[in-house]
Structures are given as C-alpha cells and as structure tokens.
Image (cartoon, rainbow, N blue to C red):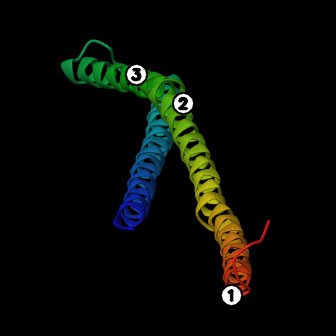
Amino acid sequence: MGFGSDLRNSHEALLKLQDSELKVLETLKKFMSLRVKSDKEYASLLQNICQQVEKHETSSPVDSVSHVSKSWACMVHQTEQLSRIMKTHAEDLNVGPLYRLTMMIKDKQQVKKSYQSMQQHMEAEMCKVTKTELEKLKSAYRQLAKEATTAKEKYKEALSKGPLQF
C-alpha cells in the first residue's frame, strides 16, 4: 500500500507549503502595514514641523531678501512637499497593494480550507471503500464458503449412502 502512503505524504507536504506561503504573505502584510503606519506618522511629523515654522515666521517675520532666508523658505517648502508625497504614497500603498494582499491571503486561506475539506471527504470515502465494503465482501465470502462446505458435506453424505435408485 505504498501508493496511499505516498499520497498522504504529498498531502502533508502540500499543507506545509500552503502554511509556509500563508506565513510569508502574513509577514509581508505586517511589514506593509507597519510601512504605511510609519510613513503616515513621518508625513504627519514633517507637516507639524512645517506648521511650527509657519507659526514662528508669522510671529517674527524673516527677511525674505537674503540667501539664507530664501534657502530656509525653500527647505520648508520642500519638506511640505515631501510630507504630502509621503502621505499620498502611504495611502496608495494602503488601498492598493496592501488591500490586494489581504484579499490574496483570504483567498489562499479559503483554498486551503476547501482542500482540507476535500481531502477529508476523500479519506472518508477511501475508508468506506477499503474497510466497510471490504468487510461486507469478506462476510459474504465467509457465508458462501460455509454454504459451499455444507453443500459439499451433503454431497459426500449422499454419495456414502449409495447410488441413487430410480
């Protein structure tokens, strides 16, 4: 019965493969979620810095003619842009790849569950055929063997009484 054990081994190997794929996908999802969270936090912190600079500039205006003040204004502007870009990218990552990854994980979990259900059904059918049906056939064989033995004994008994007379 090596064939059955080979199938059982391949079933276990397939389950291990599915589990490892799900584990990798869950790790990737966790990484992406953390990335989205950290990018949003970073964008928020950059925006807070820019707001603080604006508050400071409104309370004490800086000379906008000097190169230092122009560089400062450019740096603040670039920081605001970076903040918006980071926030946009984090949101895009969240609604795009992260959402699709979540759906893929759910699909893989459903496929695994379906596969396990089918495997259990097949094992139950195999058990039914190999054990239940086999036991029925053995029982019928024993009954027929007993009937054959009884008929053989009757035949020998009839022969021992002598030939039949008409």
Tell me the tag on residue 160.
Answer: 1
Helix, strand or loop at label 2? It is helix
Tell me the tag on residue 85.
Answer: 3
Query: According to the image, label 2 marks what residue?
Result: 99
Q: Can residue 51 be seen in this view?
A: no
Query: Alpha-carbon neighbours of circle 1 within 10 Å: few (<14), some, or many (≥20)?
Result: few
Q: Which of marks 3 and 2 is nearer the N terminus?
A: 3
- Location of residue 145 by image quarter: bottom right
Q: Which of marks 1 and 2 is in front?
A: 1
What amino acid type should be assigned to the residue bearing mark 2? Answer: Tyr
CB atoms at circles 1 and 3 under 8 Å apart?
no
Image quarter where the C terminus lies is bottom right
Seen in the picture, residue 6 relative to 48 is either above or below; the reply is below
Query: Alpha-carbon neighbours of circle 3 within 10 Å: few (<14), some, or many (≥20)?
Result: some
Helix, strand or loop at label 3? It is helix
Taking the spot 29% from the left edge, 25% from the top edge, the residue there is 75
Task: Identify which residue, 164 or 107, lies in the foreground.
Answer: 164
